[in-house]
Amino acid sequence: MSAVNGIGMGDSEDNSGRGNRKASVEVTIVGEDKKGIVAEITKYIFNNGGNIEKINQNVIKGLFGMHLEASFQKINKSKVKEDLSDLSHRLKMEVKVHFHEENKIKNVAIFVSKEDHCLLKILDSVSKGEMVSNVSMIIGSDEKLKPMADSYSIPFFYIDHVNQNEAESRILQMIDQFDIDLIVLARYMRILTPNFVWRYPNRIINIHPSLLPAFPGALAYVQAYERGAKIIGCTAHFVTEDLDQGPIIIQEAFKVLPEDTLETIKSKGRSAEAAALLEAVKLFLSDKLEVYWGRVNFK
């Protein structure tokens, strides 16, 4: 852990079976479709005293995917990892497990490209103690923001994105290595593939420069300016397989004045983006967000 409180690389505590805090486990299974997959995992949860909270499954062109959330009063993390690893080998499928504990200081990965306003807002908030989290790493599709990461003593990893699939494969390994709870896209100018997004449902937050569902995709401010929009803003939302269609968390807006130009609109937009993304991240880290039927609810 760095000298800056809450920022840097740290080890998460293993509360294997200790205390009475309710623990939640997320299990994601991906692989060739076959019979008995759902039965295998649900049987394991019930046999170990767990209660299934949510379950979602899908089959597309022979590829099976399932995401399950289960809660336990007591849990031995090492044993669960070992058991699900055995299940993965037996089923010949990819099985990922992620633990969520109430009041745990969450590990955050921030993805960036070249723009620094959202990243700076988050790091400044954490360094001042306004937001409790462990910013474990920053991943960049460009090396421009490495000096900023270095100034906060945060590991920065430049990933060559010439081949998006290869880049995502490397990133997936790193997310597992750092036990990441939340992925923040701080003006990360790459489109994550469904193969990546599906593995982290409601754990990836993006900031989009428009009041969604208006002006999705690239150049949102340009579209709004050219259409003569009178109110422009931005949207912090969870990322799904459908581009810019994920559940909305926070939106910020500002009026377009007669004297505004495209450049002044972009400047106002950057301030709004940083504020909205920071608020969405704070809500997630304080366990105040739940998603039901594609809509964000506040606890």
Image (cartoon, rainbow, N blue to C red):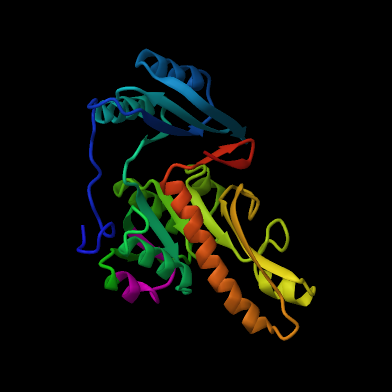
Q: Is residue 241 left or right of residue 10?
A: right
- Regarding residue 105, the answer to whether it shows in the image is yes
Q: x, y percentage for residue 23?
A: 35, 30
Residue with the most extreme top position: 47
- Regarding residue 158, the answer to whether it shows in the image is no
Magenta region:
137-149
Q: Is residue 195 above or below residue 215?
A: above
Q: Residue at x 39, y 31 (%)?
A: 25
Q: x, y percentage for residue 132?
A: 34, 53
Q: Quadrant of residue 109?
A: bottom left
Q: Is residue 244 left or right of residue 278?
A: right
Q: Residue at x 29, y 25 (%)?
A: 20
Q: Is residue 249 above or below residue 28?
A: below
Q: Residue at x 67, y 72 (%)?
A: 221
Q: Is residue 144 magenta?
A: yes
Q: Is residue 161 above or below residue 261?
A: above
Q: x, y percentage for residue 274?
A: 50, 66
Q: x, y percentage for residue 93?
A: 43, 32
Q: Is residue 68 magenta?
A: no
In the rendered image, the quadrant that contains the N terminus is bottom left
